[in-house]
Amino acid sequence: MPRKRQTARKRLSDRYSPGRVGDFPSLKAKQLLRILKRNPLNYQVVSQTGSHRKLESDGRPPINFAWHDRATVPPRAIKQLLVSKIGLTEEEAHDCL
């Protein structure tokens, strides 16, 4: 039986290769907002209505940030925000985190 467990664990670890969502952590929204505000991204909150914030930065696309500060942002959303919406490469996104 232990062999089956080991092979099952190995198969699970094989699923996580570079470039997968599993490489990105889940973060609290407040932490993610802090990351967006610091160098090299330099986003600033332009307007806010409730938990919805509009962020802008020179040379980067505007972002609508719609999470409560204590909410946990899943890895897929973090990857989508940094890579798809902002336009960073996955390597640059990891460096920001």
Image (tube, rainbow, N blue to C red):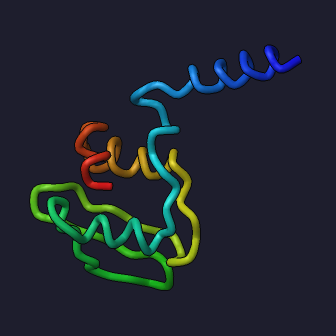
Considering depth in this image, is 77 or 14 the residue closer to the camera?
14
Q: Quadrant of residue 72?
A: bottom right
Label count reads: 0
Considering depth in this image, is 20 or 42 the residue closer to the camera?
20
Residue, x 44% and y 84% (percent of image)?
A: 49
Residue, x 39% and y 75% (percent of image)?
A: 53
Could you tell me which quadrant the N terminus lies in? top right
Residue 35 in the image: above or below residue 24: below
Could you tell me which quadrant the C terminus lies in? bottom left
Residue 73 in the image: above or below residue 14: below
Q: Quadrant of residue 31?
A: bottom left
Residue closest to the far front: 2
Residue, x 29% and y 65% (percent of image)?
A: 36
| Coordinates of residue 39 in the picture (x, y in percent) | 16, 64
| Coordinates of residue 64 in the picture (x, y in percent) | 38, 65
| Coordinates of residue 86 in the picture (x, y in percent) | 27, 50
Residue closest to the far left: 59
Residue, x 10% and y 63% (percent of image)?
A: 58
Residue 56 lies left or right of residue 58; in this view the side is right
Q: Quadrant of residue 32?
A: bottom left
| Coordinates of residue 54 in the picture (x, y in percent) | 33, 72
Residue 68 lies left or right of residue 80; in this view the side is right
